[in-house]
């Protein structure tokens, strides 16, 4: 009797889930688990719900319970693999997705997830085969074409990347997020005008997946030292102490460590919830905000003595809204400090690395228009990329007229 009741509840929950009634579906799945705490289908579907809500650790707990009951089930292996990928545990994700595909080789979604995980691990060549198979199995789907386009771009195959990105855009239909990401990639490949900023969904997804290995990747492989360099420039020209500091695009908190000596109170902001979760582990931040910086800054008028953006503005093209927002969020005489990737000629340009480069002269003009006085501008190598240095410029600005400062380095 209990088994029949659980089956009925599960079918009703799945139907509600399919209609997008997530709260109702969850309530029904929980009723199933009250009757049978190990019921694998209920745990698997609870894992799907958690993934939809951006809660990868919760998703993993449920998908692990499903696999514990049915370790050979391809649908459970596939969902657990996807949850592992979203949690940044990419090597484990690849193993589970391959196990799922060994049992169900024509699962287009798992093929796409496998390709994306391999690409995120830096093996775009291995990613290409499952992604090509995914688009053969699901030729009308935009998502596999977009994933293939990114893999081809990573391989330096510009023509193939362009063709796949065009296919993704043609199939995006009413999915504005996918269409925006396809247009952004096309612009990075030189087709079409660059938008004023990277799509928020692209940035959030990129750094959500990057979060668990972010620091090791940047500091060990890419020789990333920009937070320390920017903090040193702030110290040299202004030496603030005991101010409220906002760390824009705080990521895992690398920049917060460099900014902490200036702060009586340190706050962080990032689009990526998983980056913020990593930052919270440092114990540095009094508050962490999951928000878009252009929207957040005007909501905090005069709240900060220092607003810093380390390796963040390269995901924005037009910097006028960001600089105006910084000026609004700063108290009179407060400091803005940030890095940009260096460009020349055009105010901004979108590169194949899918980040914007900015002309420093244009940036200085925007800063003046926003009411800033420039205290320092310094050329810097921001990091290494594919064995080459990435040229950048560091700025330190004061809101309003300049007061006395130390000489620049």
Image (cartoon, rainbow, N blue to C red):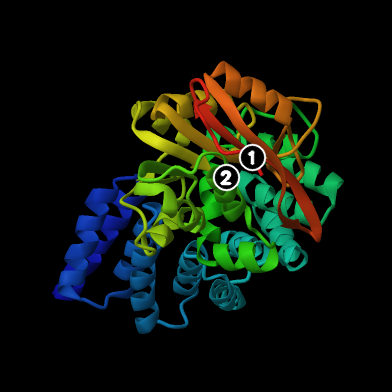
Q: In the figure, 184 relative to 14: above or below?
A: above
**Whole-percent x, y for residue 165 in the image:** 73, 42
Earlier in the chain: of badge 1 and badge 2, it is: 2
- Assess disc 2: are there few (<14), some (14-19) or many (≥20) residues with their C-alpha within 10 Å of its C-alpha: some
* Label tally: 2
Q: Secondary structure at mark 1?
A: loop
Marks 1 & 2, CB-CB < 8 Å contact: yes
Residue at the disc numbered 2 = 236
Residue farthest to the top? Answer: 369
- Assess disc 1: are there few (<14), some (14-19) or many (≥20) residues with their C-alpha within 10 Å of its C-alpha: some
Alpha carbons under labels 1 and 2: distance apart:
6 Å
**Whole-percent x, y for residue 248 in the image:** 47, 42
Is residue 242 something one can see in this rendering? yes
- Which residue lies at the image location 37% right of the left edge and 58% below the top edge? 284
Is residue 111 something one can see in this rendering? no
- Which residue lies at the image location 21% right of the left edge and 76% below the top edge? 37
Looking at the image, residue 55 sits to the left or right of residue 237; the answer is left
The quadrant in which the C terminus is found is top right
Looking at the image, residue 340 sits to the left or right of residue 249; the answer is right
Q: Nearer the viewer, residue 356 or 182?
A: 356
The quadrant in which the N terminus is found is bottom left
**Whole-percent x, y for residue 96 in the image:** 54, 76
Q: In the figure, 184 relative to 209: above or below?
A: above
**Whole-percent x, y for residue 48 in the image:** 39, 60
Q: Nearer the viewer, residue 393 or 6?
A: 393
Residue at the disc numbered 1 = 408
Residue farthest to the left? Answer: 1
């Amino acid at each position: 009797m209990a088994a029949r009741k659980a089956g009925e509840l599960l079918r009703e929950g799945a139907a509600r889930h399919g209609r997008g009634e997530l709260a109702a579906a969850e309530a029904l799945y929980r009723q199933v688990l009250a009757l049978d705490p190990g019921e694998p289908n209920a745990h698997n579907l609870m894992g799907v719900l958690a993934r939809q809500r951006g809660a990868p650790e919760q998703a993993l707990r449920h998908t692990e319970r499903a696999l514990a009951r049915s370790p050979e089930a391809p649908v459970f292996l596939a969902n657990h693999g996807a949850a592992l990928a979203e949690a940044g545990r990419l090597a484990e994700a690849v193993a589970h997705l391959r196990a799922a595909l060994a049992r169900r080789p024509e699962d287009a979604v798992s093929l796409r997830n496998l390709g994306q995980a391999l690409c995120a691990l830096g093996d775009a060549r291995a990613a290409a085969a499952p992604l090509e198979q995914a688009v053969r199995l699901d030729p009308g789907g935009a998502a596999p074409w977009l994933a293939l386009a990114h893999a081809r771009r990573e391989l330096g195959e510009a023509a193939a990347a362009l063709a796949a990105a065009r296919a993704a855009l043609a199939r995006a239909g009413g999915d504005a997020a996918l269409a925006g990401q396809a247009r952004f990639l096309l612009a990075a490949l030189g087709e079409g005008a660059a938008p004023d900023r990277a799509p928020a969904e692209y940035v959030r997804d990129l750094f959500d997946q990057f979060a668990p290995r972010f620091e090791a990747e940047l500091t060990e492989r890419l020789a990333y030292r920009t937070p320390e360099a920017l903090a040193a420039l702030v110290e040299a020209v202004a030496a603030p102490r005991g101010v409220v500091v906002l760390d824009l695009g705080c990521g895992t908190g690398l920049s917060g460590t460099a900014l902490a000596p200036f702060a009586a109170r340190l706050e962080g902001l990032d689009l990526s919830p998983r980056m913020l979760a990593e930052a919270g582990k440092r114990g540095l931040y009094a508050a962490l905000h999951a928000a878009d910086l252009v929207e957040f800054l005007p909501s905090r008028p005069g709240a900060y003595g220092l607003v810093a953006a380390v390796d963040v503005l390269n995901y924005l093209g037009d910097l006028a809204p960001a600089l105006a927002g910084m000026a609004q969020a700063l108290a009179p005489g407060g400091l803005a400090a940030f890095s940009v990737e260096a460009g020349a000629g055009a105010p901004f340009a979108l590169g194949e690395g899918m980040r914007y480069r900015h002309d420093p002269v244009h940036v200085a003009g925007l800063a003046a228009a926003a009411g800033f006085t420039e205290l320092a501008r310094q050329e810097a190598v921001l990091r290494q990329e594919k064995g080459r240095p990435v040229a950048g410029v560091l700025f330190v600005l004061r809101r309003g007229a300049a007061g006395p400062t130390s000489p620049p380095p």
